[in-house]
Image (spheres, rainbow, N blue to C red):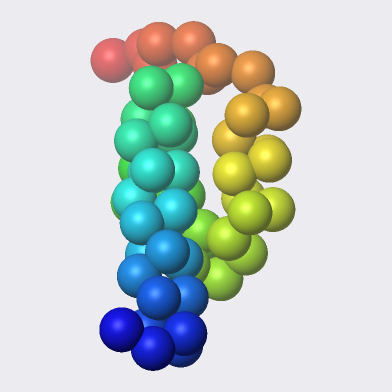
Amino acid sequence: MNDQAQFFVGWGTLSLINAGLAQSKNRSGLLWWIASLFFGPFATFLIVVLDRVGPQAV
């Protein structure tokens, strides 16, 4: 596999991990997945630093 393909596989994997992290903090996995596609490691940093969101009222 060439370097460019490895980069895209790694970036995609990071975005999926970020979506899982976001969901574990009661945040939207879909929105953070999209943000991670554009911002990558910076989005990871934000997910880790931001506090967990409380349960939403129904």
Position of 49 with respect to 40 (left or right) is right
Residue at 40% x, 11% y is 55
Count of residue discs: 0
Whether residue 28 is visible = no
Q: Which of the two residues, 19 or 31, is positioned nearer the viewer here?
A: 19
Residue at 58% x, 60% y is 40
Whether residue 45 is visible = yes
Q: Is residue 51 above or below residue 42?
A: above
Q: Quadrant of the C terminus?
A: top left
Residue 8 sits in which quadrant? bottom left
Q: Residue lying farthest front?
A: 1
Q: Which of the two residues, 4 or 48, is positioned nearer the viewer here?
A: 4
Q: Is residue 7 above or below residue 56?
A: below
Q: Which of the two residues, 48 or 32, is positioned nearer the viewer here?
A: 48
Residue 18 horizontal/vertical position (percent): 45, 43
Position of 9 with respect to 51 (left or right) is left
Residue 42 horizontal/vertical position (percent): 69, 53
Q: Which of the two residues, 49 or 57, is positioned nearer the viewer here?
A: 49
Q: Is residue 9 above or below residue 17?
A: below
Residue 9 horizontal/vertical position (percent): 35, 70
Residue at 44% x, 34% y is 22
Q: Quadrant of the N terminus?
A: bottom left
Residue 11 horizontal/vertical position (percent): 46, 66
